[in-house]
Image (spheres, helix red, strand yellow):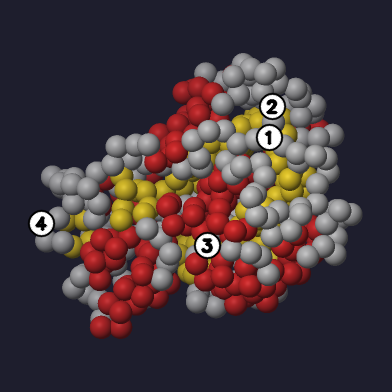
């Protein structure tokens, strides 16, 4: 049975952070050592990020909070709110993003009645509340109260793939299933000033955003599918458990993102791809760059550099990942869906492809995708793109928002 992705939409909070200005704020904190200050400048400048989005409006110079919790503009100090304070903001602001992304994904299927949705899968690793985002979406969108609801929590940056894999399984089991998948992350809630290199790297990379998709195998009137969900695989690398982790601390969640992570990915990416590609006769043994599209989770610039070099991909094939990183930063689980949206918005035919892509039929293009997370876990997926892009471009909907003056 063929399972289709019918829509894929993105959303970001209204407040933009300009990377260079955020760097200056973090570098000016009084508690930093000389080495810490140098690390801030190095990490922020080498991240290949221009802008990010945050749900914390007071992280900007244009929003003066009466009782600041994160950033005191009067003193220029970054504050250290408790985990409870951060999570209270998550409950309020993440709910908005979950609902916005879900609404956009459902509205992008004009031939579908909302009551047709049978399953709802929500994803987040940056906060908790209950009744959770699944409940909020059902109420806000007027879905059938009997919709089957599932929440994937605290898995990290790769969690969109387990969510899509679950959606595919539901549709494989029930031809009438229609699944709404929604990922939303407020990573900026957990930034803090520190001399710790992992904490500094997290502050330089992470951002807020959401993405949602409708998945089904049934025909939807007047709604051509965007792509098929072909195959998913999971691989745990033999090393890396201590190099990438996500823990709960007294002052927010604590990211461990060791500098050795890109080297671990470099050593094991070929082995992680083999279970995925070896099962497809049209791709087994093919040079990686001959697969037209690559949707790689941009965990950081150095990770993308290692993947590109190891797989011998062209600069063009890394554009969706690098542009997502440059414009939005690392939004954890939602990020790879932004990369996929970028690919879906590209012209159907590349004017100068690196090589002719293997295709099932004329007009269908293969997409190989991967994301990395704690463990170290590598999730991979194969998709087939089916339709021409919509007008407006990958970033058009997400960035047409009022923004405040950035930090």
Q: Earlier in the sequence, mark 3 or mark 2?
A: 2
| Disc marking residue 224 | 2
The residue to which callout 3 is attached is 299
Q: Secondary structure at mark 4?
A: loop
Instruction: State the separation of the CA atoms marked 4 and 2.
Output: 53 Å
Camera-side residue: 260 or 283? Answer: 283
Residue at the spot 41% in from the left edge and 71% down from the top edge: 46
Q: Earlier in the sequence, mark 2 or mark 1?
A: 2
Residue at the spot 76% in from the left edge and 41% down from the top edge: 364
Above/below status of 99 relative to 37: above
Drawn side of residue 63 relative to residue 298, left or right: left
Q: Earlier in the sequence, mark 1 or mark 4?
A: 4
Task: Tell us which disc is closer to us: 2 or 1.
Answer: 1
Where is residue 117 shown, x and y percent of the image?
64, 24
Location of the C terminus (image quadrant): bottom left
Instruction: State the separation of the CA atoms marked 2 and 1.
Output: 7 Å
Kindly tell me whether residue 135 is visible in this rendering: no
Drawn side of residue 170 relative to residue 405, left or right: right
Q: Earlier in the sequence, mark 4 or mark 2?
A: 4
Where is residue 322 shown, x and y percent of the image?
51, 59
Q: Residues within 10 Å of mark 2 (few under 14, many from 20)?
A: some
The residue to which callout 1 is attached is 387
Above/below status of 275 relative to 160: below
The residue to which callout 4 is attached is 74
Residue at the spot 16% in from the left edge and 56% down from the top edge: 72
Instruction: State the separation of the CA atoms marked 3 and 4.
Output: 34 Å
């Amino acid at each position: 049975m063929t399972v289709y992705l019918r829509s894929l939409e993105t959303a970001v909070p209204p407040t933009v952070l300009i990377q260079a200005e955020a760097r200056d704020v973090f570098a000016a904190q009084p508690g930093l050592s000389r080495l810490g200050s140098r690390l801030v400048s190095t990490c922020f400048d080498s991240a290949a990020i221009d802008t990010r989005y945050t749900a914390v409006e007071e992280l900007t110079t244009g929003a003066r909070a009466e009782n600041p919790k994160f950033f005191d503009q009067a003193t220029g100090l970054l504050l250290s709110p408790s985990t409870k304070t951060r999570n209270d903001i998550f409950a309020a602001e993440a709910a908005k993003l979950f609902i916005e992304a879900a609404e956009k994904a459902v509205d992008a299927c004009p031939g579908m009645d909302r009551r047709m949705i049978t399953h709802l899968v929500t994803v987040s690793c940056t906060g908790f509340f209950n009744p959770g985002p699944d409940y909020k979406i059902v109420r806000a969108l007027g879905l059938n109260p009997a919709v089957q609801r599932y929440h994937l929590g605290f898995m990290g940056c790769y969690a969109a793939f387990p969510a899509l894999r679950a959606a595919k399984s539901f549709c494989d089991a029930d031809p009438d299933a229609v699944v709404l998948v929604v990922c939303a992350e407020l990573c900026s809630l957990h930034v803090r000033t520190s001399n710790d290199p992992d904490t500094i790297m997290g502050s330089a990379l992470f951002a807020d955003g959401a993405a949602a998709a409708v998945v089904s195998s049934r025909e939807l009137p007047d709604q051509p599918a965007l792509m098929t969900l072909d195959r998913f695989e999971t691989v745990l690398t033999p090393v890396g458990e201590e190099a990438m982790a996500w823990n709960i601390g007294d002052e927010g969640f604590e990211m461990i993102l060791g500098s050795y992570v890109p080297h671990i990915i470099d050593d094991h990416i070929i082995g992680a791809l083999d279970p995925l590609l070896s099962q497809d006769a049209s791709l087994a043994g093919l040079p990686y760059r001959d697969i037209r599209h690559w949707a790689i989770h941009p965990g950081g610039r150095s990770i993308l550099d290692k993947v590109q070099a190891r797989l011998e991909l062209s600069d063009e094939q890394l554009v969706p990942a690098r542009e997502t990183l440059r414009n939005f930063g690392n939004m954890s689980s939602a990020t790879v869906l932004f990369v996929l949206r970028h690919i879906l918005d590209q012209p159907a035919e590349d004017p100068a492809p690196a090589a002719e892509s293997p295709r099932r039929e004329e007009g269908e293009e293969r997409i190989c995708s991967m994301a990395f997370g704690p463990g170290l876990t590598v999730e991979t997926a194969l998709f087939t793109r089916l339709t021409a892009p919509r007008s407006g471009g990958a970033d058009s909907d997400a960035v047409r928002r009022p923004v405040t003056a950035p930090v």
